[in-house]
Image: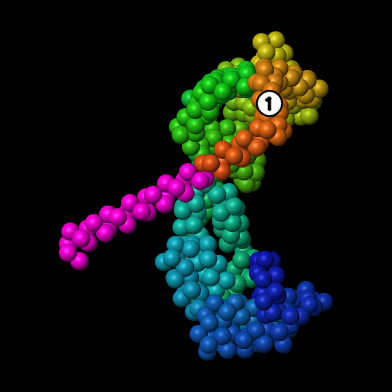
Amino acid sequence: MNLKTPALVITLACAGLITEAYADCGASATIAGTQRAYANGQKFERDNNSAAAFAAYVAAQEYTCETNPVEAVAAKRAAALALTLGTAAEKAGKFDKAFDFYDQGGQYAAADRSLMALVRAQPDSPAVFQKAREALEFRALPAFQSNNEIRIGITGAYRPDPKNLAEVLAIPATGAQRALQKEAAAFNEQYLRDYQQMIQSRPNDPTDMRAMQAFIASQQGFARKWGDQNAIKASRDALGLVRSWGSATNDLALSARIETQRKQRIEQRVATLTKNYSGAPKLLEDAMDYQSSALLEDSVAKVRIDAIKAQALRLGDEASARQRLMLAAEYYDVAGDDAKATAARDQQQKAAMTRMQPSIDQMKKQAEQMQKEFSDPAKIQAMREQALAMQKSLQQQKQAHAGAKAQRADDLEKELGL
């Protein structure tokens, strides 16, 4: 029997169920190897290890140069175990495992049932779609019947339901539309407005403690309102899924339509960010990331990204002129102008040091005064004597308290006639 799934060959070989190299005739196993696999299957069954027995029986059906003497009996045992293992997997909701058991055991109608259940449970998974499409398209080929003649002879006549393949082939179009709808919901402009407002509220003077506390409060308020939500990330993740659907389908016309819709949506996001939310440098950086993901020709992409960088550079100059140096440095970072970004940060640091200099000078003066006082021997002696006097006073108070307590105890005993 020809092995239809290359991954299964690797799995079985790694498990030690197929140990021989491929023969010159193109066989995947030898007679001795399949007989050992069948014997292993019987042993595993006696040990109540159904999964291992099933894998061994599947391995025993491998194609050999000469007629495989254990293929039919191995297929019969694998078919029976496939029903048990597949049913258990289905009940547990593990439709992918159920499909694999049924498919390798020759229970093709049951395999199709599990496969469609998997597709319907994960309608937004391009990987599941591709697995289903490949399986169902192969089922429709004449080679499928001839390659699996012995298995089908054991499990009964099988014909694939064309409705299953039609349902699967319709998935990329609907999946791409759902992803676009999800992206539209994720790109929340209220989130963007709140973020831009928070960035704009950052004080120009980082040494202004009251203003910085108000800014920190605004950051905390933004975090409380939006939590882990990130409108940009969610939007780009959804657009990534749209692209995956375009790549997954083998319908070239549909793939082209999906890619066109994706690029149109990207252009909308770039326009929105650059026109309405350029007050936050990070959002201009996000606009460049969107533009890069459009996968345009290099010359076109460069012109559009350079335009966003030029906008960031202009906004950086404007912010610098208003002495919003921290904001200016972030714009320059987006523009890729490292020299201007460094200069803005240096200027910010110097301005902060200038504003803090009077306080620094006062602290230095106080430190010098303290050092001067503690370096005067007379003052140190006076402080030592003061400390000793205080210690002596505390001891006297403790003794007086203890004496008064003892006198009160004596008086109480006399009163009680003890």
Q: What x and y, as percent, mark residue 248?
A: 62, 46
Inspect the image, locate mark 1, and give the three-letter code of the amino acid beneath it.
Gln
Q: Is residue 120 magenta-colored? A: no
Which quarter of the figure is the C terminus placed in? bottom left
Query: What kind of element bears circle 1?
Result: helix
Q: Is residue 272 above or below residue 133?
A: above
Q: Looking at the picture, tell me which residue is in the foreground, 198 or 17.
A: 198
For the magenta stretch, what is the residue range? 391-418
Task: Kindly identify the residue that appears in the image at 61 percent across and 66 percent down.
Answer: 144
Q: Which residue is mark 1?
A: 369
Q: Main secondary structure of the magenta part?
A: helix
Task: Kindly identify the residue that appears in the image at 47 percent across and 43 percent down.
Answer: 393
Q: Is residue 20 above or below residue 101?
A: below
Figure quadrant of residue 147:
bottom right
Q: What x and y, as percent, mark residue 216?
A: 53, 28
Q: Is residue 210 visible?
A: yes
